[in-house]
Image (cartoon, rainbow, N blue to C red):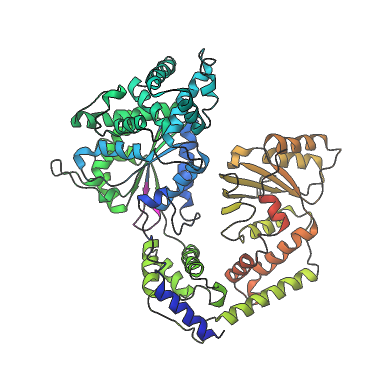
Amino acid sequence: MSTTDLYRIFDQARKQCPNPFTLKSVISANEVWGEVMTDLPSLNQHIDERISDAIFEIRKKYSNKIGIAVKGDRGTGKSHVIHRIWKNIAQEGGSVFAYIGPCANPKRINSHVRFYLADSFNHQDIQGVTQWQKLAAAAIKTLKITELNEKYSAYIEKCDAPNELRKYIVATQTKDTLLEFFDELVEAILENQPGIDFYFLRALLFLLLKSVKSAQIAFAWIKGEDHPEIKKLGLPEFSIEQQEDKSIWIIQQICKLAEIASLPVLICFDQIDYGVNDSDSGDSGSQIIAKCIDQIYFQCSNVILICCVISDTWREIEQMGSGIPDRVGQRSVTAKPPTGGQMIELVKLRLDWFYKHNNLNSLDYPNLYPFKENEIRNIASESAGVRSLMKWCAEEFEKGVILPGKDDPSPNTEHKKKKEFLEKYNELLNNQIDIPIKDDDKLAAIITCGMKMIPDGGTENVVITKVDKISDASHDLHLTISGYDSLHKRNVKIGIRVSEATNGKTFNAVMARLLDYNKHGITRGCLVRSTSVPKNWKVGNQLKEQLEKQKGGEVVIFKKDEIRPLVAIEAIYDQAENYGFDKEEVTIFVKSLRLVADNLLICEILSAPVEL
């Protein structure tokens, strides 16, 4: 097929298909809970880490409440961060999450937050369990350490699988006995947890049952909605004014119960600049939200209050007195506009959707067609946000077929350059390139270089979001790999140390630092060397066993043939100009050819050790 025909096919697809750069360019509540079209985990990862640190602090009771202001202009990815927070909680658990959107009635701000918090907790994790069910099951599980353990043992043992607990309750209780059964459970739980309200706990237990009528009535009561059968469920009725006053109290009850289960409560306030002003007080919509956050901060514990705010809106909050800005922004983190490289990755994600949707082969077209890389980088250099980038791309995409000019790379040119790269790469391999055995730091640099060239889709079920080189402190880690393990549904941070030590004491010193998971916050340690640990190193083998059996880490013994390709890649990358490429081209070729992603050493490092 001729080049002209390929571009005509592209243009035909462009006319018939939705513009990929106008689809879901703004994150709404639906996307927070569902899927987003383009999310780049590396974008604003520092915010994810700051929030993860806060969750850790609350869970460990180092703090009992934290306010976090996430600042940044529109389109810098603040809502994408919220989406990732929920996605992580849905996959890993460990906390509960609520998303609060703009408020349309400033007089009912507390009820608004209560309503959306209750609605948020009805969303299910990847196991099909709602956050309400988690809390209810956690309340029942508290009976395990009481004298009533034996009486309720059949229920307690199912608390880690709330849907199984729900089925068991439905199977063992009738409609006539259910209310009495729950009342007995409430009284039993409150004997040891007196800080929880009787009626709130009764309503919560009904939410275990998900969609049955009694659960719907209880859910309406918790949300603050009117329901004609609330009294039949033995729950008190409140007027509209009372509901507003009760709203923070309900949130307080939720936080208390979640604390019993060691589940920090994250409440995310998004798009607060879209709130409605209060004509009576003169407060802006953002100031009304700030006062509400401040009220929750004072009355609740075990809570993280996240406020996403643009710079102009934050200045309004800063003008407020009574220390409100200090609590709302107790900690502050700023969203950063994407770098040139991140801009390019975002554009690629949209183009990949377009190619896949239209059964086109991206290799038939120049890189980033119909855009030019330098144009995208120019937008990034102006510190533009994602929305500005998407708007520009959407307009350019509509302009029709853009035949490559004389200086533009054609598909044939790209194919030729990739072929040249492969030739240089294979030449190095065939010449038996030197491997710097015994040079720990150089071997670590080679592995680090390779880890940065794994495709966005990851390898060995691990999607890499960040590669950090550790300082050259003696015996410490060489690097850490942060990412997401899609097989085990959890975030991982792998600490890697290369040690070719032939001295037992040096090896022991390295292992001692690798076993200190807390220092760099790693979830798994990995020691890399070319020879097995000598059997006569008694202490060394004890430390190795501790790493593998107690810490879930591993010692990876590599063969020369496994690291040789990584040595060749690093050599070409470091001297890219001498080989006739630029460094970004080398990265693109290595990613597309999966030269690192399929490397046996890299796969062994990233794959979770087999549990015996």
Whether residue 483 sits left or right of residue 560 in the image: it is left
Farthest residue, direction right: 536
Which image quadrant for residue 488? top right
Foreground pick, 452 / 115: 115
User: Can residue 174 be seen by looking at this rendering?
Assistant: yes
Percent across and percent down for residue 67 are: 37, 38
Against 489, residue 464 (above or below) is: below
Percent across and percent down for residue 25 are: 38, 61
Question: Is the stretch drawn in magenta largely helix, strand or loop?
Answer: loop
User: Can residue 293 be seen by looking at this rendering?
Assistant: no
Foreground pick, 188 / 403: 188
Q: Which residues are magenta?
A: 70-78
Percent across and percent down for residue 460 are: 65, 53
Percent across and percent down for residue 552 are: 67, 39
Which image quadrant for residue 195? top left
How many discs mark residues in the rendered view? Answer: 0
Whether residue 56 sits left or right of residue 417 in the image: it is left
